[in-house]
Amino acid sequence: MSGSPAVVMRLLASAYSVAEKAGSIVRKVLHSGELGIVEKTGANDLQTLADRLAQQSICASLSRRFPKITIIGEEELPAEDPREDLVEYGHSEEILQKTCPAEYSGLKEEEIVVWVDPLDGTKEYTEASRCVRHPAEAQISHKGPYISHSAALWLLDNVTVLIGIACGGKAIAGVINQPFYNYQLGPGAELGRTMWGMPGLGAFGFQLQEVPGDRRIITTTRSHSNKVVTDCVDAMEPHEVLRVGGAGNKIIHLVEGRASAYVFASPGCKKWDTCAPEAILHAVGGKLTDIHGNTYRYDANVKHMNSAGVLAALRNHEYYASRVPQSVLQALKSD
């Protein structure tokens, strides 16, 4: 590597470490047993202390190092200086050693928009908390509590930290942290992993796999379903349907070969849910659009809601788009 790394590479390297810090915060709050839950718009739209602290950490850490970027986070929080222990100053040397794709090498801070979901899968996070041992009894690994109740295990898979980087309306880089990855290994296991990707450079931190053969395995919402959502999933003629939480988790299903398409015919998710996952999916040749097949934009001034749902696939996106019923297309107007 010659010269100083490009701004976007320095930002991505910082976002990697910041996401790991946020993942640690998410684990610590769960272990404390004091989740500080509040309902934002209802029982399926929750906010916890982990959401608040993780967003404070991410926004403060990135804005201090890159003061001219625009950061848009999910949580509406009061403007205040965060505790110093929430600020992360580290970065990934591995990312800094990568060669920035030419189309991004000249980007300036003020051209970049960062979309942040500090805790994707909050509902599953709160449900899992009920199955974690009492803090006084928990066995602690280097990075968090040992999860003892089998009912909690798959819920923890749903939880991710998402940091998406956009420019010119496009998702150009993304970081996904899974705070509880490796919980299956029991006491003493180090929890958490971080994956990242950039179109034109690749994706890292996981083993890319595809669903074998011609099996159609659809992943869709666990807690926000309705007739339109169900009709759209059924139209894909799936061999199997996986109902799980979190947009980040669903994209992980795609890139690790557990699902072939992510189908959500509803205006439920937002730009901070899809920016980072889209960048990683795109980096490995996949595609994420609305239910009409139109790409979403991630400019600073766009509306936050993904009004026309989500349709994503690692391969054969066109096939899934062709299967969307006309009734669903009419129900969900494209932006």
Image: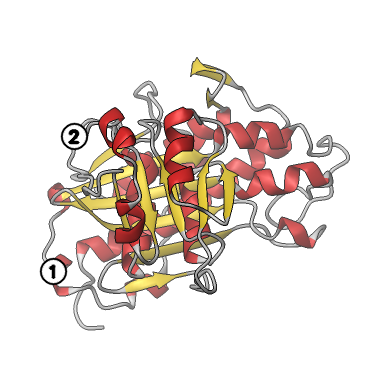
Camera-side residue of 149 and 292:
292
Q: Is residue 13 left or right of residue 41?
A: left
The quarter of the rendered structure image containing the C terminus is top left
Q: Position of residue 277 (x, y in %)?
A: 39, 53
Q: Of the residues tagged 2 and 1, which is closer to the observer?
A: 2
Q: Amino acid at mark 1?
A: Glu
Marking on residue 335: 2
Q: Residue at x 29, y 74 (%)?
A: 201
- Quarter location, residue 282: bottom left
Residue 306 is at least partly visible in this image: no
Q: Residue furthest bottom?
A: 1
Q: Is residue 187 above or below residue 274?
A: below
Of residue 165 and residue 121, the one placed in the foreground of this image is: 121
Q: Residue at x 73, y 48 (%)?
A: 153
Neighbours of disc 2 within 10 Å: few (<14), some (14-19), many (20+): some
Give whichever of discs 2 and 1 has the lower sequence position.
1
In three-dimensional space, the C-alpha distance between marks 2 and 1, rounded to whole angstroms, equals 27 Å
Q: Please name the colour scheme applied to the rendered image.
A: secondary structure
Q: Which residue bears the numbered disc 1?
A: 103
Left or right: residue 73 versus residue 193 is left
**How far from the left and from the top, in percent, is residue 245?**
55, 41
Neighbour tally class for label 1: few under 14, some 14-19, many 20 plus, Cα within 10 Å: few
Q: Residue at x 38, y 49 (%)?
A: 163
Instruction: Inspect this view and state whether residue 263 appears.
Output: yes
